[in-house]
Amino acid sequence: MSGKGSVLRLDVDNVFQDRIGETHGLPRGEVANLKRRIKLCNRDIEGRRGKDVGFMELPYDEALAARVKEKAGQLRGWCKNFVVLGIGGSALGNIATHGALNHCFHNLLPAEHPARNGAPRIFVLDNVDPALLGDFFDVVGDELEETAFNVITKSGSTAETMSQFLHVRDRLRSRGGDPARQIIATTDPRPEKSLLRRIAQEDGYWTLPIPDNVGGRFSVLSAVGLLSAAVGGIDIDELLAGAAAMDARCRAQTTDENPAALYAAILYLFYRRGKPITVLMPYSARLQRLGDWYCQLWAESLGKRDGLEAEDVFVGPTPVASVGVTDQHSVMQLYQDGKFDKVLTLVEVEEPAGPGGGPPICEGQAEAELAYLAAHTFGALFGAELTATRCALTDKQRPNMTIRLPRVGPRQMGELFMFFEYAVSYSGCLYGVNTFDQPGVELGKQYTYGLMGREGYEPPAGA
Ligand code: PA5
């Protein structure tokens, strides 16, 4: 359990009383009081590993990675657009991965640009808003036959995804496309569990599995996230290697060695002290969409009515996604001067533009009043803004942690995904809830089925 090669560092100094004062800080010893409970949580998570909980095993599925890479190579040979049809856990990991690891304007670059390297344009359609679908088909235009659709749904029946699937299949059939070549189905491998699996067998689609013990929001490192990553040119071996390195660290039993357990413990302690809002604020445009993935992971895993004995507990921290520097000119006012109900997690990328700090702000003449900017790189300005925010928060007694990464690459993304998935698992254990179910989401699905007239389902009373 060495965690060799792991580069993520978690700095928690600014949550303690000696940094932010007695009223809002934690006593240094308080985390240690959770030692026994963390150990029990560790035992619980380890005991379920590879049984009913499988996210931590995903980095080691070499056969799947090989299959995905082979298929991605074939797809890159003919497809100009690669489209994910999915929602929630079947979409947000894909969005976060592409946002982080592909060029910020990937779809706008010419395909032969070195930063795109022949990869297709990537789209993730995670809404059934007719405006979105209409606009999407405007963009695809006459490239429909050169477009691959990856339908992703673990249950194989989610109304949003299946309606998109029906529409796409229909369009392909009626406009000379070839559904069997252009549709890839990622779903539960058991036909008796997944309608999409049964359809895929009948229609002859190429398929990928989602393991039974990996829930949607924990599935980014499964086939759910890997295929679109590989098609987009992302090194999935590195992604998985980073996740494996973090897995090793998060198996440790103590908060000194295990960053996910430490993170979970701190947020839990603050929750109990009246700070139920947890803000993730990467200083990185590339990591902006990681925030949406994080919010889903946190909210669906921890926002629960039932405790482990099915008693009413109504718990759950409220996750919020922010991004630096953009939000310094928006919600930061609230974070600094509003209610003392938040804990911030900043993400610092030490070399956001690679070594050297990116382009200089200005190499030519600048006005005297702007000379203080002109002399620097954008990297230096970005770093200064992060430091300014951290100091301002600390001065104002706002608990804040910093996750440090040398850069945003596939290895670091693998680490981040695994870190947060473990952290939410430790959190669920501390809150005493089932981290891995989502009864609220399921109820919404059932009501939708009922309202749309699906056999066996009732619309909600009063609809
Ligand atoms: O995390 C979850 O379990 C959910 O958000 C699901 O991913 C989401 O509801 C979509 O479900 P499915 O993949 O079955 O279509």
Image (cartoon, rainbow, N blue to C red):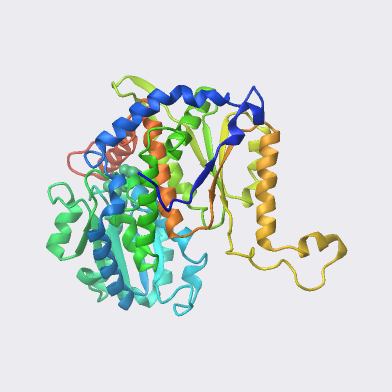
Identify the image quadrant of the N terminus.
Answer: top left
Q: Is residue 50 positioned above or below 366 on the image?
A: above
Badge count: 0
| Quarter that holds the C terminus | top left
In this rendered view, identify the residue nearer to me: 244 or 402: 244
Location of residue 392 in the rendering, given as x and y in whole percent from the top left corner? 70, 39
Could you tell me if residue 96 is visible in this image? Answer: no
Q: Residue furthest right?
A: 368
Residue drawn 44% across and 51% down?
6
Q: How far across and down, in percent of the image, does residue 58 sit? A: 29, 51
Q: Quadrant of residue 444?
A: top left
Query: Does residue 448 sit above or below 272 in this rendering?
Result: below
Is 378 left, or right, of 268 in this rendering? right
Left or right side of 240 for 368: right
Image coords of residue 320 (percent x, y)? 52, 40
**Residue at 44% across, 60% down:** 98
**Residue 15 coordinates in the image, percent (x, y):** 59, 32
Residue 189 can be seen, yes or no: yes
Identify the image quadrant of residue 151: bottom left
Against 307, residue 398 (above or below) is below
Relative side of 295 to 349, left or right: left
**Farthest residue toward the bottom?**
112
Q: Nearer the viewer, residue 322 or 347?
A: 347
- Name the side, left or right, on which 383 lies relative to 126: right
Residue drawn at (25%, 74%) of the image: 177
